[in-house]
Amino acid sequence: MAGPGAKPVNGARRTDVVPARSVRGWTLIGPSDQRVFLATDIVGPCPFMSCLQDYTDEQVVFRNAATGQELARSDSLPKMTSGALVTPGDDGAIDYLSLQGTIYQLAVQPAGQAAK
């Protein structure tokens, strides 16, 4: 997955490329000096992208927008609804709409810390 980097003077530029499988749009959050790239990643093997019709799970991946470095990854979630984006919600939560219509709210927390 490659994401653009915006520079007010230079226009768009290519940043690092990282392996990922997403059929969704992506979202950028955070201030310009700490931008985070949010996207989904299809879970499991997918030779030649043959799984795109049959996959059932996705994960939300948080990456440093400047470097592509993975910062966090959700547990597996049911397939996301078509046309939806991973969306910032209230209180810093991230909203994820499953194909079944369930809205999941994700909250990032330090590793090893219990969920609230």
Image: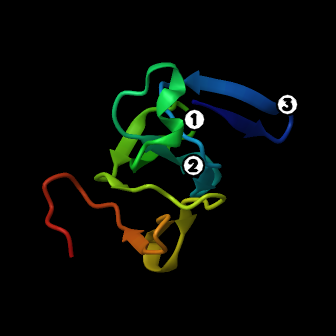
The amino acid sitting under disc 1 is Ala
As drawn, the label of residue 35 is 2
Split into 4 quadrants, where in the image is the C terminus?
bottom left
Circle 3 Cα neighbour tier, 10 Å, few/some/many (<14 / 14–19 / ≥20): few
For label 3, the residue is 10
The amino acid sitting under disc 2 is Arg
Q: CA distance from mark 1 to mark 3?
A: 15 Å
The amino acid sitting under disc 3 is Asn
Given contact means CB atoms under 8 Å apart, are the residues at marks 1 and 2 in contact? yes
Given contact means CB atoms under 8 Å apart, are the residues at marks 1 and 3 in contact? no
Question: Can residue 20 be seen?
Answer: no
Query: Residue at left 80%, top 33%?
Result: 12
For label 1, the residue is 66
Query: Residue at left 50%, top 34%?
Result: 21
Q: Earlier in the sequence, mark 1 or mark 3?
A: 3
Left or right of 3 on screen, residue 87: left
Q: For residue 83, what is the image quadrant?
A: bottom right
Residue 41 horizontal/vertical position (percent): 45, 41
Circle 1 Cα neighbour tier, 10 Å, few/some/many (<14 / 14–19 / ≥20): some
As drawn, the label of residue 103 is none
Left or right of 10 on screen, residue 14: left
